[in-house]
């Protein structure tokens, strides 16, 4: 069972290793010069928007949270002079995580002029 868990972990790590911030940046660079309409056609309806002095800001956010389950400790029972002594060995705690990315596009005269992003999961796979 441990080999299966390790193999699954290695496979997931390999997949995650292909997604990079550099690849996300490549995708974002292609939006510069596109119209707001073209951006929305590809990215979908934004989660938020703001307008100030003719500049529009479109916000796209995504996040996921979860728990990687831990492993129960193993009970070791030893008998000494007819009396049982049990100790717990090993085990790991559960680990909670949150992956998130927020991207904001700056639009002037209905054209994307810049972007910014923040979060620990602003990554994409290489599309080439």
Image: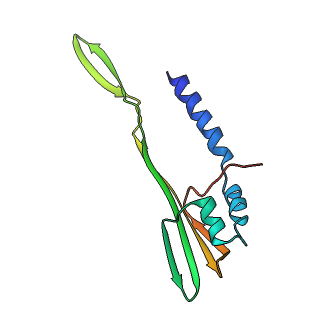
**Which of the 4 quarters of the picture holds residue 39?**
bottom right
**Vertical comparison of 41 with 92: above or below:** below
Identify the residue shown where x is 63% and y is 71%: 36
**Vertical comparison of 63 with 29: above or below:** above
Whether residue 88 is visible, yes or no, is yes
Judged left or right of residue 46, residue 35 is right
Identify the residue shown where x is 27% and y is 14%: 80
**Vertical comparison of 7 with 62: above or below:** above
Q: Nearer the viewer, residue 48 or 14?
A: 48
Q: Residue furthest top?
A: 82
Q: Nearer the viewer, residue 96 or 34?
A: 34
Identify the residue shown where x is 57% and y is 79%: 56
Where residue 61 appears, as percent x and y from the top left, is 51, 62
Q: Nearer the viewer, residue 93 or 32?
A: 32
Q: Residue furthest right?
A: 128
Q: Nearer the viewer, residue 95 or 53?
A: 53
């Amino acid at each position: 069972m441990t080999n299966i868990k390790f193999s699954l972990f290695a496979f997931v790590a390999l997949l995650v290793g292909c997604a990079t911030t550099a690849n996300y940046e490549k995708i974002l660079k292609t939006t510069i010069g596109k119209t707001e309409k073209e951006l929305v056609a590809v990215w979908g309806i934004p989660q938020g928007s703001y307008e100030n002095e003719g500049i529009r800001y479109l916000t796209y956010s995504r996040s996921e949270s979860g728990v990687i389950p831990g492993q129960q400790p193993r009970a070791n029972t030893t008998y000494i002079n007819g009396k049982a002594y049990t100790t717990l060995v090993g085990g790991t705690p559960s680990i909670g995580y949150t992956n998130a990315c927020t991207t904001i596009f700056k639009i002037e005269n209905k054209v994307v002029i810049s972007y910014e992003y923040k979060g620990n999961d602003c990554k994409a796979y290489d599309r080439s």
